[in-house]
Image (spheres, grey):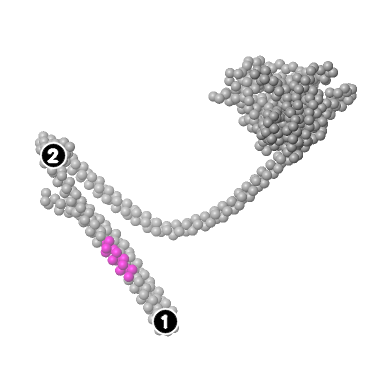
Amino acid sequence: MNNRPNSIARAFIVFAGLPMILMLFVVVGLLASIRFFDYVENSDALEAQLNELVLEMQELPDARIDEIEAIRGERQRKLDRDILLEMTLALAMLVVGVAVPVMISKHIASMMEQNLNLLGDRLSSGGPEASALMHQVFDFSEFNGVAETMRQGLRERGEAEQRWKRAEKELVGMNNDLMNQARELGQGRKVAFSMMEDAEMAQQKLEEVNQRLNLVIAEAQASAQEADFANRAKSDFLATMSHEIRTPLNGVIGFIDMLAETDLNEEQLDYVNTVRSSGETLMALINDVLDFSKIESGYMNLEVRTFNLVTMLRELASLFFNEATQQGIALNVEIGDDVSRMIDGDETRIRQILTNLLANAVKFTEQGEIRLIVTRDSIPDANGGCAIEFEVRDTGIGMSPQQLKKLFRPFSQGDSSTTRKYGGTGLGLVICKRLAEAMGGKVWATSRVGKGSSFYTRIQVTEAVGRGSVTPGHIPLKPRKVAEREKPDRPKKVGEKFPLKITVAEDNHANQRVLQMMLRRLGWEADFKGNGVELIEHLKSHHCDLVFMDLQMPVMDGLEATALIRSGAAGEAVKGVKIIALTANALSGDEGRCLDIGMDAYLSKPLKLALLEQRVVELFATDEAGSATA
């Protein structure tokens, strides 16, 4: 085995090193020849250029010609240095290219020598010491198997060498392909540079466009802020106007109600009822405008609670039963068997939508019938959520397709003649649409001229599981009893049942008079103060059971006065006094703020005698029942 390293080294040099060296010689020789030809061409070009220059400048002095010769010599020397440097580098690459394969061959041969010696030791070892070299000790009977394995390994090695040769050929072909691609890339470099310049110009244009876009966005944001400020100003203006309009209207309607309770002849009573109807119509128009502004300004909040759907529908339909009957119109309410009778939703807003739709149906129907049909539009989910659809179907005047398109636009009706004949602001259906959308639903309509219309409202509610009740699909309706005028021998006044010390904080004298007359009719007397400061000073030295608190007053408003009373500024004795808020502002979410700051109840102007009595009784009847239980 002494000659094995030499033979292995020669094999590596012959089969691996020589091809690599030859390839290196070919590549370096090719590059050197290309560079040498470039050098010759550059030298000839320089010589020709300078000769032409000398011929053109024969009339110049000899010193100038010598200078040109010196320049030519300098350039020629530079070309000589460059070619010498590149030839030296090529020679160094050849030396390294020859030395590296030889060194690698010797190193690989040494490694092979060590491996073959180790394999020979393992094959020749048969005693106990073989366990230090192998995991398993071989004896003579197994040597043939090892020899067969060696022969198989040699065959596999031969196959590997063949694959290596094929791979070498493929590598040479790939190398040629790479060289061709390199030449193509060299040719395409100019195109790439041109594309880079185009890209830089496009980037500059893009930056200019971005700058203009940023300016447009800034202008749009400024416009949005201005629109938001304008919307807030509009909301504040409407809130102020609602208070300013509803405050005197409270006095008008209040005094009309008081006047209607006095002894009047038939003609006077007719005048009073006409004025009261006109005042209530005006209040309805104001409420429509304020509700629309409230929705547009984002002040509309939903109050979800559990209520009986059938009870609400019966009460709602009863409001229109008398009027429909007087016009000769049948009014029917039908509810599907699969509709839950107890649901969680905003009863007030649902009632508002249906009230508007039923009012329109009664107003635009002269004969036939009106049907309110309630169905469930979807299967309840795991939490009981489902969609309920309300349909108000009438046999009225109907509408054309052009009129239907205008229905749900603000301040718009089917046509101008409708407004002149039937009145209205054109906001009712818009409010219905926005309210339905706020409850996850929608509103739409179908109609035919002279055949009637159908208005649909679909909203999302939650079924109150386990609290439903079975009711017939058709809800029977009864006419509402018309309130009779108060007779002289009326029962005991509520003021006698609940003797209260009442103080009113109200700055408007007309409203003071109205409230004073209402309280007297209920059996109470009250002290009146013009602002929150006067009220607090009064409470410091006077006992009080109930305070009616106007929200908007000079010097100190109702919210600030309530906060001071609850903090004890008027004394510990009246710290827990009952406070009922009074406001003509229906836009700014006053009820929630009043309850949050510590008030006990809320009344919106214009005041109604029955509702005023109901609020007071609710507050003090609860306290009386609690005391009796204790």
Position of 14 relative to 149 (above/below): below
Q: Is residue 487 left or right of residue 40?
A: right
The residue type indicated by label 2 comes to: Ala
- In the rendered image, residue 47, in percent from the top left (x then y), is placed at 37, 74
From the viewer's perspective, is residue 44 above or below residue 283? below
Residue 553 in the magenta stretch? The answer is no
* Along the viewing direction, whichever of 321 and 498 lies nearer the viewer: 498
SS class, disc 1: helix
Tell me the quarter of the picture where residue 514 sits.
Answer: top right
The count of marks equals 2
* Residue position marked by numbered label 2 in the rendering: 130
Q: Is residue 87 magenta?
A: yes
Q: Residue at x 12, y 52 (%)?
A: 3
Is residue 272 left or right of 591 when viewed as pictured?
Answer: right
Q: Which one is earlier in the sequence, the residue at label 2 or at label 1?
A: 1
Quadrant in which residue 409 is drawn: top right
Q: Is residue 198 above or below residue 278?
A: below
Percent coordinates x, y for residue 54 in the rendering = 41, 79
- Taking the image as shown, residue 237 lies to the left or right of residue 375, namely right
- Please state which of the two labelled residues, at mark 2 or mark 1, is closer to the viewer: 2
Residue indicated by mark 1: 64
Rendered view: 126 above or below 354: below
Identify the element where label 2 is drawn.
helix
Residue displayed at 80% across by 32% down: 512
Q: Main secondary structure of the magenta part?
A: helix
- The segment highlighted magenta reads 81-94
Q: Residue at x 15, y 38 (%)?
A: 131
Circle 2/circle 1 CB separation < 8 Å: no
Q: Quadrant of residue 468?
A: top right
Is residue 520 visible in the rendered image? The answer is yes
